[in-house]
Each structure stands twice: as C-alpha cells, then as structure tokens.
Amino acid sequence: MTENSPAPKISALAITYNEEDNIRRYVESLSFADEIIIVDSYSTDATEQIARELNVKFMQKEFLNFSDQRNFAIQQAKNDWILFFDLDEVVTPKLEQEIKTVLANNSNEIAYFVKRKFHFMGKKIHFGGWQTDRVIRLFNKNHCAYSGLVHETIQARGVVGKLSEKVDHYSYKSFDNYNGKLTMYSKLQAENLYNKKRRPNAYHFFFRPFYRFCWQYFFRMGILDGKEGFILAYVHSFSVFKRYLQLWMKYRKIA
C-alpha cells in the first residue's frame, strides 16, 4: 500500500448462538466496517430476526467446533482485513479510531493483539490472570487461520503487532449463564481429550482443580478482586473438575 492509497476495506465477522441481547450492540459498535457477516448456529431466540433487521449478511451453519465455525466465516468475507470480535466484546470509539489508523499506515504487521477489560458481576476485574488477557481480533485472512477446538487461537504467519486501546469484555449475563459457558467448554475439552485417548485419574480430579484455584486466586492475585475474584477462581477450578468428570463419563459410556 502506497502513501496515497486508500485504507483497506474491513470485514467484521461474528459467530452466534442465542445472542439476542448482544447482537444489536455488536453491529452498532462495528458499523464502520465495510461488511458485517454473522454465522449463526441455528439460534432459538430472536438473534436471526434482529440480525436481518440490521441488514447484515446472515447465514446459518451447524456448529462442529469453534475453529471450524470461525474459519468458515472467514471464507465468506470479501475483504482481506478481518475484525473478529465476540458478541460480548464492545469496540470503543477510541479502539475504532486506532483500528482505522493502523490499517491506513503502511505496515508489515499481518495481525494485531487487542487487550481486553473483563467485567464480571458488574465489576471490572483487574487480577486473576485477566490483567494480561489479550487476543488477536484484527488480522489479514491471507496469513491467518484459527486452530483448536476450544479457546481457539489464531495461527499467524508473519509479524503480529498490538493495539494500545482495549476492548470491553462483558462475558457475564448471570451466574447460571456464565457457569453454563464454562460447562460447554468443559464438554468440548473432554471430547478433545477423549479423541486423544487420554484417561482421567486422581491427579486430574483432585490436583488439577486445586492448582487452578490457587493459580488464579493467589498466584495471579485474584484475591485482590474481592468476592468476585473468589467466585471466578472457584467456578473456573470447578470447570476443570467437570472437564475430567465428562471425560470419565465418556469412558463409562454414561455421556
């Protein structure tokens, strides 16, 4: 791109399932993109209706795993530069401006990390591991692809930069909703371990959850976030226990 060439066009993508509470906010915060594409896993709420009212490109695909769903969405994009935020993430005006600025500059970066400000139970969380939370959310699709069944990550073939502005991350709707997300992740992780023929033992049931709690609450200073920090450490450690319980149940042919 030369000095006088226009900034590249952007495709904003999202994968959804029952996101009627978030989809309007998502589309509005990314209205500066040249196209917005929603790949939905056959939501049973009003997600589809709201998306079509907002005149975005909407399609549905059966969910196999997160990487498959995201890579399929990338294939639908007309433009090389991709914004792939989650529905519970909010792009601020300052972050929007920084995205436009870095893309207008002639740079050799093919992807950018974005730091996230995590909000839980109405409180901004500062510790517990979230103080270093960052993910690639802006990338050139010609050099990047997702991998991993759960907590999928971008594999970038080139130089990765980082943005200074942060995205607000509102993962918490209610305790049951948040716990339900962790349960879903546990099931997918158990499936992945089962396919690798891993077998759970006492170490996985007792030490791994205990270590997760200590790591998050003490080593990563979640204790400084008060009761919210304790709750987060507890539910995440219990999700580790559920992962291996689900794996054990698969070998027992219970699930």
Image: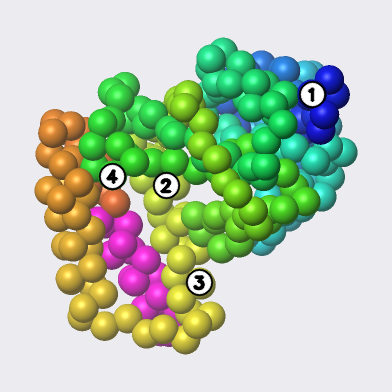
Q: Tell me where residue 213 appears, x and y as whole percent.
A: 19, 54
- Quick one: 106 or 36, which is closer to the camera? 106
Question: Residue at horizontal 41%, vertical 84%?
Answer: 198
Residue 6 visible in the current orientation: no
Q: Residue beneath label 4, please?
A: 129
Separation of disc 2 and disc 4 at Cα?
Answer: 21 Å
Identity of the residue furthest to the top in this view: 93
Q: Residues within 10 Å of mark 2 (few under 14, many from 20)?
A: few
Q: Which label sits in the foreground, 3 or 2? A: 3
Q: Residues within 10 Å of mark 1 (few under 14, many from 20)?
A: few
Q: Residue beneath label 2, please?
A: 180
Q: Secondary structure at mark 4?
A: loop
Q: Tell me where residue 79 appears, x and y as whole percent.
A: 83, 37
Which of the 4 image quarters holds residue 30? top right
Separation of disc 1 and disc 4 at Cα?
Answer: 40 Å
**Magenta stretch: includes residue 247:** yes
**Magenta stretch: includes residue 138:** no
Amino acid type of disc 3? Glu
Separation of disc 3 and disc 2 at Cα?
Answer: 17 Å
Q: Residue beneath label 3, please?
A: 191
Q: Which residues are magenta?
A: 237-255
